[in-house]
Amino acid sequence: MLDFLKTKKSKNLKISDLAVQTCSSINNNSGHPFDEIQKYKPLTVPEIKLYRALREAVPIIDAAISKIIRLTGEFKIKSDNLELEYSLNKFIDNVQVNSCERGANSFILSHLNQLLTYGTAVGEIVINPENNSIQALYNACLSDVVLTTKNSPLDLLVLRKK
């Protein structure tokens, strides 16, 4: 717009007098709105260490997060079908979580802990070898996970770092 003012013989015209102003599109190299997904970078290891260190160094942060987690409590399934209710609650109480815990509540509280500490969390449902039931629930460490895309930004891949 300033070039217009210089090239045209409108020396008395000020920018404030213009009825319409346009933005420059110099940095608009993106052809598709989902291209931004490819530029997204999840938390890096230093950021994860920083959030962990903040929680350890500032007791009020740790106390607040711990209090929210405690207030979450446990849950049970209620149903008119008592047999179904019993089966679901048995599963919730006994499903393996991570390497040494039991119960979906452990999984949920660990997931919530990661969400509140780091702003993100990764959980996985592990299917048994026959692919017919849930074998375990797993809370992944954020520093072990990489998000990437295939040919399209809509083909999201969740990978484990080696």
Image: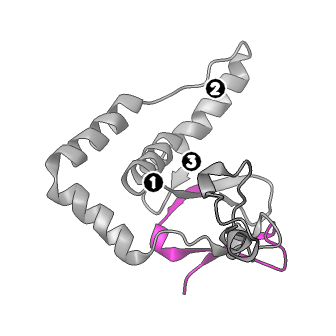
User: Does the segment drawn in magenta span residue 126?
Assistant: no
Q: Quadrant of the C terminus?
A: bottom right
The residue that appears at 31% across and 62% down in the rendered structure is 51
Kindly identify which residue carries mark 2.
Answer: 86
Which comes sooner in the sequence, label 2 or label 1?
Answer: 2
Kindly identify which residue carries mark 3.
Answer: 95
User: Does the segment drawn in magenta span residue 143?
Assistant: yes
- Give percent across and percent down for residue 135: 65, 56
Q: Is residue 107 left or right of residue 53?
A: right
- Name the amino acid, label 1: Gly
The residue that appears at 72% across and 59% down in the rendered structure is 22
Q: Could you say which is closer to the camera, residue 7 or residue 41?
A: 7
Q: Could you say which is closer to the camera, residue 59 or residue 66?
A: 59
Q: Which residues are magenta?
A: 136-162
Q: Could you say which is closer to the camera, residue 4 or residue 73?
A: 4
Kindly identify which residue carries mark 1.
Answer: 119
Q: Is residue 27 left or right of residue 30?
A: left
- Name the amino acid, label 2: Tyr
**What is the CA distance from the residue labelled 2 to the residue labelled 1?**
35 Å
Q: Secondary structure at mark 3?
A: loop
- Of circles 1 and 3, the one toward us is 1
